[in-house]
Amino acid sequence: MRFRFDVFRRCARGACPDCGALGQLAGIVTIRDCCTACGMVLRRREGFFLGAMVWNYGLTAFGLLPMLLVLRAYAWIGFAAAVWLAVAVILIVPWLIHGVAWRLWLATYYGFLPEQLPSLGRPLDD
Ligand SMILES: [Zn+2]
């Protein structure tokens, strides 16, 4: 198995992982259900969204919350401010980066499993 960086880059830019049509994953908050250019289903069966949740959780928990810990550790913000900011980050950021998390999930999935792309034989309807 060889990781396909071209597919990863394509998805991370917001393009369709299969045909490369730009704007298919363009929403920051959400993505389309399927590609309007080639018909590839982007939101596949039940459970496929879990990968996007992992990216969303990872970016929030390991990307942003440690920054608050650093700010608090150097006493640049008070304890109450750190708690309020953490609550705000936990409630707002996952919603804001939903589309980005989907992009990264599709990029990871099809980067590792390019044979799952419809152009390489997978049916369009799942
Ligand atoms: Zn497409």
Image (tube, helix red, strand yellow):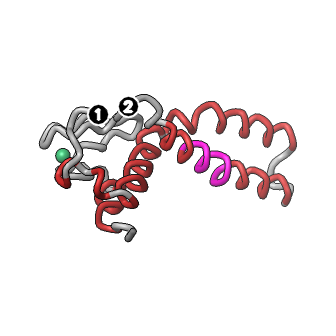
Q: Is residue 120 above or below residue 45?
A: below
The residue lying toward the viewer, choosing from 82 and 3, is 3
Q: Quadrant of the N terminus?
A: bottom left
Q: Is residue 70 above or below residue 89?
A: below
Q: Which mark is residue 126?
A: 1
Q: Is residue 40 above or below residue 46?
A: below
The residue lying toward the viewer, choosing from 13 and 92, is 13
Cβ atoms at labels 1 and 2 below 8 Å apart: yes
* Quarter of the image where one finds residue 20: bottom left
Q: Is residue 13 visible?
A: yes
The residue lying toward the viewer, choosing from 70 and 43, is 43
Q: CA distance from mark 1 to mark 2?
A: 6 Å
Q: What stretch of residues is rendered in magenta?
A: 56-64
Which structural element holds mark 2?
loop
Kindly identify the residue that appears in the image at 43 percent across and 28 percent down.
46
Question: Residue 52 at what x, y percent from top left?
Answer: 48, 42
Disc 1: CA contacts within 10 A as few (<14), some (14-19) or many (>=20): few
Which structural element holds mark 1?
loop
Question: Residue 95 at what x, y percent from top left?
Answer: 52, 33
Question: Residue 32 at what x, y percent from top left?
Answer: 28, 34
In this figure, which residue is indicated by the disc labeled 2?
45
Q: Is residue 60 a member of the stretch shown in magenta?
A: yes
Q: Which mark is residue 53?
A: none
Image-based side of 112 in relation to 83, left or right: left
Question: Residue 48 at what x, y percent from top left?
Answer: 43, 37
Kindly identify the residue that appears in the image at 85 percent across and 57 percent down.
73
**Magenta stretch, overall SS:** helix
Q: Quadrant of the C terminus?
A: top left
Q: Is residue 74 a member of the stretch shown in magenta?
A: no
